[in-house]
Image (spheres, rainbow, N blue to C red):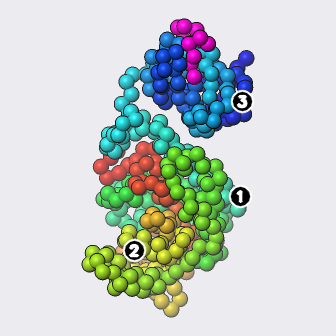
Amino acid sequence: MATNISIKNIAQYDGQEVTIRGWVYNRTDKGKLQFIQLRDGTGITQCVAFKKDMDAEQFDIAGKLTQESSVIITGSVRKDERAPGIPGGFEVGIKSLQLVQMADEYPITPKDHGVEFLMDNRHLWLRSSRQWAIIRIRSTIVNAMRNWLDNDGYMLVDTPIITPSAGEDSTSLFELDYYGEKAFLAQTGQLYNEANMAAFGKVYCFGPTFRAEKSKTRRHLMEFWMLEPEMAFYNLEDLMDMEQSFISHIVQTVLEKHQEELKILERDTSSLERVLPPFPRISYDECVERLNKLSDAATDPEQKQLLHIDWGTDFGSPHETAVAEMFDKPVFVYNFPSVFKAFYMQPVEGRPEVCRSVDLLAPEGYGEITGGSERIYDSALIEQQVKKMGLGREAYAWYLDLRRFGSVPHSGFGIGLERTVAWICGLPHIRETIPYARMLNRKYP
C-alpha cells in the first residue's frame, strides 16, 4: 500500500510507492508524456504521467489538468538530478491519478501582472512560489523569536487590543466607540507589559498592533504584528546585549532552515551571514556629526539636503540608510533626544533633553528593526511626564500605580515582524510580508 507523504520529505522515499495530495502548479504536454508540477503546501515536485503506465481514462484527465486543479497522485519516487522542484532532484512516476476538482481558468499565470492586480487577488497570489517562500520564512521567524525567549526564561503574557489610552503618538490611533466611551486599537502592548513585568520578571507580548499613520512608504502598514519583551532590572546596556543575541538567533535560524526559499527569493545571504554579536553601537550625537560631515562632503545638492540633520530632529529614511552603511552588520543607535521619543523613557543623567533609548538599524536600507529604552521608574518623574505631555491622568492611573508599588529599573523594546521579514527576505516592499496587508488604500481581500 502506498505511503501518504509530504513533498518536503520526498527524498526519504526513493524507490518507494507514495501518495501525494495537492494542486497542479504547472503542466507540460509532451504527447505520450505529461509533466505535472504538483504542490502540496510543503514543497513542489515533478510527477510524470506516461501513457503506457496508466489507465487510459486517467491519462486523458492528466492531459486536461488546469492550473490549481486538485488531485491525488500515487506513484513511485525516483531520483533524477534534472527534476525541478522544492526540493528538486526527485520525481514521481504516476501509476494512478484521482481528480478532486478541475479548477476554473486561473487568473494568475506565469506572465507579468501588475502589483495592484496581484494584491486584489492576494488570496490566490499566496500560492505562488515567491509568496510561499516569504510566508514560510515569516513562520520560522515567529517560531525563532518565541523559542529564544521561552528558552531564556521569558513568559508570554497577552496584552489587550482595545485600550483607553495611547502608548505612543496619540495622533496615529484608530478610535473606537466603546459603548459610548472613547477607546482605541492598541498601537503597542508595552504599557501593559510593564505591569506584567512587575509580576513575572521577564515577559513578552506578541500580537497585532494598529497605527493610523497616513503613510504610503514601503515600510508602513496600518495593521502589523509586534513582539515586545520587557525585563526587570535591565539597563540600556543589558537591553542591547540581549537584543543582539536575540536578533542573531532569528537570522541564523532562517539561514539554517530556508536555503531553498532564499534561493527562490534570489536573496544574497552574505550580509545575513554577518549578523552575529557583537553589533556596533553609536550615539545619536555621533550620528548627527557623521551625517553632517557626509552632507558637507556631498557634491550633489539634493544629497546634501537629504543627509543634513539638525540636532533634535528624528532620523528619516536617508539618515537611517546612511548610518547603517557605515557598518557591515546591524547597528545600535542610542541616547536619542527626548523631544521625539515616548513619555516613559528614562532621561540620561545630567542631560534631561536626551533619553536612554535605542534603535537597531538593519543594513541594506531596511531601517529601524527594533525600538526600545530604559523606562522611567521614579514615581514623581513619570507623573511629571504625563502632565507635561498633556495626557489625561485618569486614563493612565493604573500605569502610574506601577511606580508606587515596588518600582524597579527596567527596559524593553518592540520588534515589528513585517519589517524583520522584509529585511531577512530582501523584499522591496512590506506588503508581501503579511498574508493580507492593510495599507492606506487597501483593506481587501
Q: Where's residue 132, x and y in %? A: 51, 41
Foreground: 265 or 5? 265
How many angstroms separate mark 1 from mark 2 (CA)? Answer: 36 Å
User: Would you say residue 385 sits in the magenta stretch?
Assistant: no
372 is higher (above) or lower (below) than 204: below
**Can you tell which of label 3 and label 1 is closer to the viewer?**
3
Name the secondary structure under disc 1.
helix
Name the amino acid type tagged 2: His
Residue 151 image label: 1
The residue beneath circle 2 is 319
Foreground: 277 or 347? 277
Residue 128 horizontal side relative to residue 182, left or right: right
Single out the residue that lies furthest toward the top: 56
How many angstroms separate mark 3 from mark 1 (CA)? Answer: 34 Å
Marked residue nearer the N-terminal end (1 or 2): 1
Where does the N terminus fall, quadrant-wise?
A: top right
Name the amino acid type tagged 3: Tyr
Marked residue nearer the N-terminal end (2 or 3): 3
Taking the image as drawn, is residue 442 in sight?
A: yes
Instruction: Tell me which segment is drawn in magenta.
Output: 48-58
Judge the density around disc 3: few (<14), some (14-19), many (≥20) Cα neighbours within 10 Å.
some
Residue 192 horizontal side relative to residue 222, left or right: right
**Can you tell which of label 1 and label 2 is closer to the viewer?**
2
Residue at 43% over, 65% down: 365
Name the amino acid type tagged 1: Asn
**Can you tell which of label 2 and label 3 is closer to the viewer?**
3
Residue at 67% over, 31% down: 79
Residue at 53% over, 24% down: 35
Name the secondary structure under disc 2.
helix
Foreground: 216 or 159? 216
Taking the image as drawn, is residue 389 in sight?
A: no
